[in-house]
């Protein structure tokens, strides 16, 4: 082995030694131990109410429409329908437009109007005709169409005001050969009052007065 090779090997070994020495020295100078107790912890917050909303859960987020229907203004609902008139007709025998004709829509089976091509989302929601457009379903759908029926082709942003929806539904109810009866104003309050009246009448030996028809 000649002197040039010896010099090259020595230079290489010297360079490696210097680099290792610098690395060891840097570790000793700059190394810091992890703290025994973290300064702060990031905690993910839960949505308000403790539970996230699920698809098709419009019912849980919205209030039933029945109490508002009891005092709804059908004439005002006709004015609200102007927001729908660009996509729907409502007269009997009227044509389908972007959306189906709405004559007799209250309590009509979902996705059942003849001659209209419904979206796959609406057909799925209909459960083969088992689901009907009752007042609650209509209210939830009108409030947020794509939330209540995922996959619907209806591009309407929705009626966020409950009183507007109640007025519209009161008017749509009248657009029928056989208007659907209004639902009870409240499942508890509506049933409790007749029951109390019957109990009082029984104590007095009188026949109970008939409940008012809707």
Image (cartoon, rainbow, N blue to C red):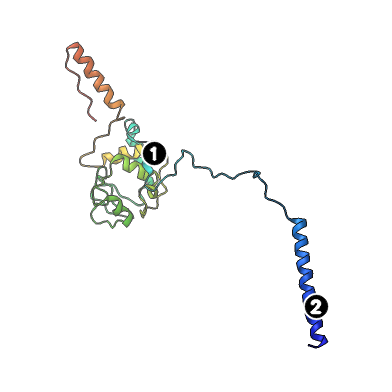
Residue drawn 78% across the image and 70% down it: 17
Quickly name the residue at label 2: 11
- Of residues 123 and 174, the one nearer the viewer is 123
Q: Say whether disc 2 or disc 1 marks the residue closer to the N-terminus.
A: 2
State the quadrant of the C terminus: top left
- Left or right: 178, with 161 as reference point: left
Q: Under tag 2, what secondary structure?
A: helix
Residue 81 visible to the viewer: no
Quarter in which the N terminus is drawn: bottom right
Q: Quadrant of residue 179?
A: top left
Of badges 2 and 1, nearer the viewer stands 2
The numbered disc on residue 62 is 1
Position of 30 relative to 41 (above/below): below
Q: Residue at x 40, y 40 (%)?
A: 61
Measured Cα–Cα span from mark 2 to mark 1: 80 Å
Kind of element beneath mark 1 = loop
Q: Residue at x 35, y 33 (%)?
A: 68
- Dot 2 surroundings within 10 Å: few (below 14), some, or many (20 or more)? few
Instruction: Check whether the beta carbons of the residues at disc 2 and disc 1 lie within 8 A of each other.
Output: no
Q: Position of residue 16 (x, y in %)?
A: 76, 72
Above or below residue 178? Residue 147 is: below
Asked if one can make out residue 78 in the rendered structure from this viewpoint, the answer is yes
């Amino acid at each position: 082995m000649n002197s040039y090779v010896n010099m090259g090997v020595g230079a290489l070994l010297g360079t490696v030694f210097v680099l290792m020495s610098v690395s060891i020295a840097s570790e000793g100078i700059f190394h810091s131990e992890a703290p025994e107790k973290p300064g702060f912890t990031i905690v993910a917050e839960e949505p308000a109410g403790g539970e996230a909303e699920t698809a098709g859960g419009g019912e849980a987020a919205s209030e039933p429409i029945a109490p508002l229907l009891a005092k709804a203004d059908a004439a005002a609902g006709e004015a609200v329908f102007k927001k729908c008139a660009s996509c729907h007709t409502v007269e009997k025998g009227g044509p389908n437009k972007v959306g189906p004709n709405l004559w007799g829509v209250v309590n009509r089976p979902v996705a059942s109007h003849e001659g209209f091509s419904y979206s796959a989302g609406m057909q799925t929601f209909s459960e083969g005709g088992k689901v009907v457009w009752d007042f609650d379903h209509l209210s939830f759908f009108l409030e947020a169409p794509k939330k209540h029926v995922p996959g619907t082709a209806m591009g309407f942003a929705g009626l966020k005001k409950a009183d507007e929806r109640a007025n519209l539904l009161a008017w749509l109810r009248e657009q029928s050969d056989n208007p659907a009866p209004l639902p009870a104003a409240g499942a508890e309050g509506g049933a409790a009052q007749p029951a109390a009246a019957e109990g009082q009448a029984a104590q007095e030996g009188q026949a109970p007065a008939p409940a008012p028809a809707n």
